[in-house]
Amino acid sequence: MNKNNIEIPNHVAIIMDGNGRWATKRGLKRSEGHLAGSKTLEKTGVHILKKGVKVLSVFAFSTENFKRSSEEVDYLMNLFIDMFTKKVKEFKKNKIKIVFSGRKFPLRDDVLSAMYKIEQETKDNTNGILNICLNYGGQEELIDASCKIAEDYKKGKLDLSTLTKESFAQYLYNDLPPIDLLIRTSGECRVSNFMLYQMAYSEMVFTNTYFPDFDEKEFDTVLDEYQNRNRRFGGN
Ligand code: IPE
Ligand code: IPE
Ligand code: MG
């Protein structure tokens, strides 16, 4: 097969969807789907970064997910604490730096301190970045960036005529490269307020697999599809 683009994508992003349906299909509670999804993240995530991908962004909890029952939200928050304090061992072993994107409010203090701790523990790691989007909204990120820009302008720290796509990115939650490959599992074909600025020119792959079943082999198939795409960026 003729490969147009044999490169490994610099930045891969995953909308990890379908945990609930994965569990329901098996007669399990939705929470068991989230637990299974957290295990998949560690296994498949490490595989992706080992392939040479520099940044892996994952959608763990959206600003809109607070609409869910308090039982489900509480379960997820406790699962995040558990992951950041006891798990993510493989990411640490492989010297991956963990960062977070999203708003702090209204996250619980115990969740925020677990996030802070893992960020501190991994801040000097240089083998890749895992960007966990938690209480994250793409529109919210753009609003927050606009407010920071207005503050800098007001203080005389920013000349608006110098703003570029790259310098604007410095005002986002994390200054990350553009997303090359965006994957959404579970068959839904929408972006659900995920990284709107960063996905401007990303290649998108929608797969029917529920996230807990998204394994290394399936990522390699998606990578193959990516490498057969012809990225034109508006050129010809
Ligand atoms: C994704 O799985 C995880 C989160 C949104 C936290 P879902 O919980 O959305 O699973 P489905 O879409 O209901 O199957
Ligand atoms: C998007 O999934 C958010 C995460 C994967 C964390 P949702 O399940 O919340 O999205 P919608 O509601 O189907 O658009
Ligand atoms: Mg969903």
Image (spheres, grey):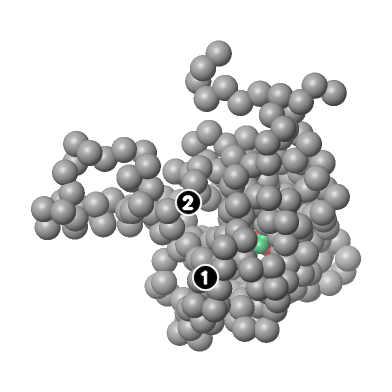
Instruction: Give ligand 1's quarter of the image.
Output: bottom right
How crowded pointer 1 is (Cα within 10 Å; few <14, some 14-19, many 20+) is rated as: few
Q: Is residue 32 left or right of residue 62?
A: right
The N terminus, quarter of image: top right
**Residue at image x 51%, y 17%?**
235
Which mark is on residue 13?
Answer: none
Residue 133 image point, x, y percent: 54, 61
Residue 41: x and y in percent read 72, 64
- Residue 40: in sight, yes or no? no
Tell me residue 173's x, y (percent): 41, 59
Residue depth check, mark 2 versus mark 1: number of the one nearer the observer: 1
In front of the other: 143 or 124: 124
Q: Amino acid at mark 2?
A: Leu
Q: Nearer the viewer, residue 66 or 104?
A: 104
- Residue at (78, 64) in percent of width and height: 43
Quadrant location of the C terminus in the rendered image: top right
Residue picked out by circle 1: 124
**Vertical position of residue 87 compared to residue 102: above or below:** below
Q: Quadrant of residue 202?
A: top right
User: Does residue 194 appear to the left or right of 181 in the view shown?
Assistant: left
Q: Give the spatial CA distance, label 2 vs label 1.
A: 16 Å
Q: Amino acid at mark 1?
A: Asp
Q: How many marks?
A: 2
**Circle 2 crowding by C-alpha within 10 Å: few under 14, some 14–19, many from 20:** some
**Residue identified by numbered label 2:** 176
